[in-house]
Amino acid sequence: MTADEMKKQAAYAALEHIDTDGVVGVGTGSTVNHFIDALATIKHKIEGAVSSSIVSTKRLEAHGIHVFDLNEVSGVAVYVDGADESNHFLQLIKGGGGALTREKIIAAASKKFVCIADESKLVDVLGKFPLPVEVVPMSRSYIAREIVKMGGQPVYREGFITDNSNVIIDVHGWTIMEAIKLETELNALVGVVTNGLFAARPADVLLLGSESGTKTVYAK
Ligand code: 5RP
C-alpha cells in the first residue's frame, strides 16, 4: 500500500466524524484533497464548508460544495486537516503546504479537530520535519536571526508566497520537547504571523491510514 493510498483511507474514514446539516472546516494538502473528494459524496447532507486555502476552495467549488467565509458562519463543528508530523499528544507540525495560518484560524474556531494522515506521520518527538513559520516579508531577516538565537536553523522558502501575501521560514534542527512553549515564544516575535506548531490547540482525534486499516488515535 502506498502512502497516498493510506492518506485516502484516512480521508474517507473522516466522513464518520462529519456532523450533517453543518459547516465543515477543510484544511489543505494531498490528504485533504482526498477528503474533499470524499466530502463530495455526502455534499447534499452538509450546509457547506469553510476553507483554509485558495487551492482547497477551488477543489471544493469544483465539486459543487458551497464555501463560506469564516466570518459568515457562527461556528464550525468539525475541522478536518492533514499534518506533517503528530506526536502522541496529537500536537502537530503543519504548514508543509504553506497554509498554516488559515488552517490554525479554522482549527481554533472549530469544536472538533480531526487530523488525517498516513501512519508515517506519527512520531515520538516533533522536529524532524522542518517547522514552518509564516512571517511578514520585511521581518524575514530579523526573525531568522532571532530563530538562530533560539537554536534553530532557518531556511527561507524561496519563491513561495502564502495566500496572505507573506513568506515562510522553515526551521531545521529542533527537537521539540515543549511544543506549547515554543509555539508561544515564536508567536511572540514581532513579524511572525503564525508558526506551524499546533500544540496549544492540538487535534482531538488522529485517523491514521495503514496496511491493517485506519487506526484511531486519541491524545495520551
Ligand atoms: C498544509 C499542511 C498539510 O496538512 C501538511 O503539509 C500535510 O500535507 P499532506 O496531506 O500533503 O501530506 O499543513 O499547510
Image (cartoon, helix red, strand yellow):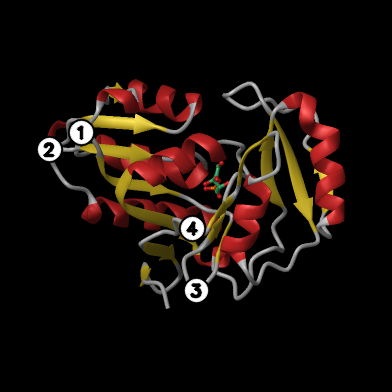
Q: Amino acid at mark 4?
A: Ala
In the figure, 187 relative to 47: above or below? below
x%, y% of residue 99? 55, 36
| Nearest to N terminus: mark 3 or mark 2 | 2
**N-term-proximal mark, 4 vs 3:** 3
Residue at disc 4, secondary structure: loop
Location of residue 70 with respect to 198 vertically, above or below: above
64 relative to 192 in the view: left or right: left
Q: Residues within 10 Å of mark 3 (few under 14, many from 20)?
A: some
Amino acid type for the residue under numbered disc 1 = Lys
Q: Amino acid at mark 2?
A: Asp
Q: Is disc 4 in contact with disc 2, using a CB cutoff of under 8 Å?
A: no
> Residue at the spot x=35%, y=53% of the render?
113
Whichever of callouts 1 and 2 sits on the residue coming sooner in the sequence is 2
Q: Residue 163: horizontal and vertical position, in percent?
A: 57, 24
Q: Nearer the viewer, mark 4 or mark 1?
A: 4
**Residue 200, numbered label:** 4
Question: Which callout, 4 or 3, points to the residue nearer the camera?
Answer: 4
Q: Is mark 1 within 8 Å of ligand 1?
A: no
Residue at mark 3 = 88
On the rendered image, what quadrant is the C terminus found in?
A: bottom left
Q: Are marks 1 and 2 in contact (CB under 8 Å)?
A: no
Q: Are marks 3 and 2 in contact (CB under 8 Å)?
A: no
The residue pinned by badge 1 equals 43
> Which residue was labeled with disc 2?
21
Mark 4 crowd level (few <14, some 14–19, many ≥20, 10 Å Cα): some
Frontmost residue, 106 versus 38: 106
Cα distance, mark 3 to mark 2? Answer: 32 Å
Quadrant in which residue 47 is drawn: top left
